[in-house]
Image: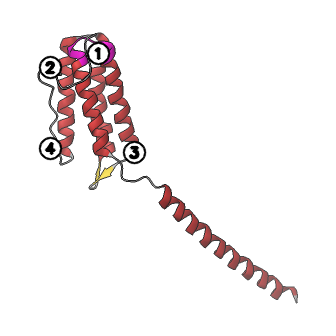
Amino acid sequence: MKSVPVVIALLTASLAANLLLWRRVSAFEARVAAATAPKSYPLGEMMGYMQRYADKLWFAGAAGNWDLAKFYHDEINETADDIAAAHVVDDGLEVSKLLAAQLPPAVDAVGRAVAAKDAAAFRQRYEAMVNTCNACHVEAKHAFIHVAVPAGPPAHWNQSFAP
């Protein structure tokens, strides 16, 4: 019976040591998480890239440069995938989920027109993609961001879109 107090003392010491260790590990994990946490996701920047790729897609398709159009179509897909994977929530709106639900079908339709090298279908599906972007902006309470089908020649680009 003399061993009972010794066992209780050992258990108490063990629990105290574990509690101290748990606190130190938790504090360390919190510091690591704070240091490695992603900063604010650059949503505006990523959307800007997507808009620039969409402009270039338009000019490449309008010029009949289907290889270049496919390249920019793929860039739009990659950027949209990055935004979706980032799980962006802005002002309580799940932007990534909204984009992932709405944009891919429109972009895929443009991709099919590019693959078919069908200029008429490309123009129609590109306009539908732009309308999808604008509908998403309205739903995200950013209707003031209104994307348009490019008008006129690509005079402001330092890139040739000719095939």
CB contact under 8 Å: marks 3 and 2: no
Mark 1 = which residue?
Answer: 114
Q: Earlier in the sequence, mark 1 or mark 4?
A: 1
Residue at the spot 14% in from the left edge and 19% down from the top edge: 153
Read off the residue under disc 3.
Answer: 86
Category of crowding for the residue at label 2, using alpha-carbon neighbours closer than 10 angstroms: few (below 14), some (14–19), many (at least 20): few
**Residues tagged 2 and 4 counted as in contact (Cβ below 8 A):** no
The label shown at residue 143 is 4
Could you tell me if residue 1 is visible in this image?
no
Quadrant including the N terminus: bottom right
Figure quadrant of the C terminus: top left
The amino acid pointed to by label 3 is Ala
Q: Position of residue 34 (x, y in %)?
A: 48, 61
Residue 27 image-quadrant placement: bottom right
Q: Give the mark nearer the N terminus: 1 vs 2.
A: 1
> What residue is disc 2 on?
153
Question: Which of the two residues, 93 or 69, is positioned nearer the viewer here?
Answer: 69
Asked if the magenta segment contains residue 65, the reply would be: yes
Calculate the distance from the C-alpha at mark 2 to the C-alpha at mark 4.
26 Å
Q: How would you rate the neighbour count of disc 3 (Cα within 10 Å): few for under 14, some for 14-19, many for 20 or more?
A: some
Residue under the image location 28 percent in, 12 percent down = 65
Q: CA distance from mark 3 to mark 2?
A: 35 Å
**Distance between mark 1 and mark 4 Cα atoms:** 28 Å
Of label 2 and label 4, which has the lower sequence position?
A: 4
